Image: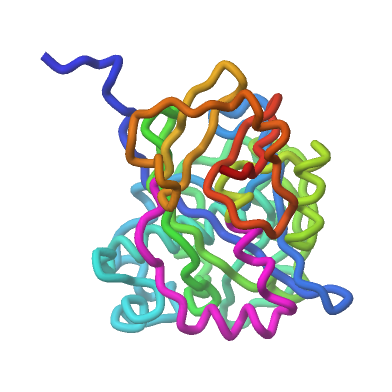
Amino acid sequence: MTDKKNTPPPLRQASTVILAREKNKALEIYLLRRSTKSGFMGGLYVFPGGVVDPDDMGLDSWAPHIDMAADQIEKRLGGDTFSNEDALGFSIAAIRETLEESGVFIASGKNKIQKDVEDICAFRLNKDLPKSWFRTKMMNENWTLSFSSLGRWSHWITPELMKKRFDTRFFIAIMPENQTCVPDNMETKHGIWLTPQKALEQNLEAKIPLSPPTVVTLTQLLKFNNLHELKHDIQTRSWGGPIAPRLAPSSNGPVILEPWDSMCNTDCKIDTSDFSNKVLPPGSSFSRIWCDKGIWKPVGV
C-alpha cells in the first residue's frame, strides 16, 4: 500500500517570464509580489507566471495566432525532451500569465493600435472572466502571440517536500515598448523594476523578499552589464537540464539545497545553527538558500 504521507504532490506544468529592460544604462528586471493569501510563495517577489491550462494547448488551433511556424518553435523554444506541443503550451501560458499578472501583452496584430493593447490590458482586470477568456479573445480578435520575443532561460522542478509542486519553464523577454507593468491586485499586489544587484541587496534587507528560484536567477543575471549582452546570450541559450533542488527542514528555518550541492541527493540533516554567520553577499557562489524568518538568504557551506 502506498504511504500517502510520503508521496510528493503531483507536478503541475507552469511558465514564468523574466521581463527585462534597460534604464539609465543599467539592466532591470520586473518583480511581482504574490498575494499573502497565495498557497505558493505567498508574500514573496517572483517573476510573472502561472500554470499551463488546457486551453493553452492545441497546435492546430493556435497556429494561425503565433508568429512562428512549428519548425521555428522547435528550434527557438524546444529542446531534446520538449516536444512542439509542450513548447506551444508553455509559451502560450507564459504570454497569458504575463498579461494577466503584470498587464504586459507580448503580442501584435494586423491593424492593431496602442489603444487595442491598452484595452486588452484593462480587460484582463475583470474579476469574472471565464477560464477560456484568453483563447477566445486572441482568436476572435485575430491577435498574433509573439513567440519570437521569448527566449529560453531555465527549467525548474519544485522540491518534493513542498505542498505544491511545479514543472516550470523560465522564459525571458524584453519589455515591449510603450507598455507599462500594472499588477492585477488579485494574485499579485505590488510590482517593481530593480537591477539584479539591488533586488538581491534588498532581499537581504527584508525589503524585497525573494523566492529561492528568483534569488538564483537574479544571481545568474548579475553577469550581464546591459540589455545588449543579455539579448546576445538569449539567442543561443538552451533550457539546460532540470534544476531540481531538495528542501531540508530545520527547526532554525528550512534550507533549499541546489542540485550542485554535495548533499542535495542525500537525506542527511543540515546543521543550521551557525547559518546566521554564513549569509553571503550578492554575487557570491552558493548552493544553499536558508529561510531566516521568512527571508531566503544564500549561505556558505
Q: How many marks?
A: 0
Tell me: residue 111, above or below residue 78.
below
Q: Nearer the viewer, residue 252 or 112?
A: 252
Q: Is residue 175 left or right of residue 61?
A: right
In the rendered view, tell whether residue 23 sits above or below residue 138. Answer: below
Boundaries of the magenta span: 217-244
Residue drawn at (46%, 47%) of the image = 258
Q: Is residue 144 visible?
A: no
Residue found at x 52% / y 71%: 143
Q: Nearer the viewer, residue 115 or 11?
A: 11
- The residue lying furthest to the left in this view is 1
Q: Position of residue 8 (x, y in %)?
A: 31, 28
Residue found 70% across the figure and 33% down from its top: 295
**Magenta span has 224?**
yes
Tell me, yes or no, whether the highlighted magenta stretch contains residue 18: no
Front residue of this view, candidates 123 and 50: 50
Task: Identify whether 123 is placed above or below 144.
Answer: above
Residue 217, image quadrant:
bottom right
Determine if residue 292 is in view.
Answer: yes
From the viewer's perspective, tell me whether residue 88 is left or right of residue 146: left
Which of the 4 quarters of the picture holds residue 211? top right
Q: Is residue 34 left or right of residue 301?
A: right
Quarter of the image containing the C terminus?
A: top right
The quadrant holding residue 194 is bottom right
Residue 5, x across and y down, in percent = 30, 15
In depth, the one of 162 and 192 nearer the eye is: 162
Identify the residue shown where x is 71% and y is 52%: 31
Question: Residue 50 in the image: x percent, y percent?
Answer: 51, 46
| Colour setting | rainbow
Split into 4 quadrants, where in the image is the N terminus?
top left
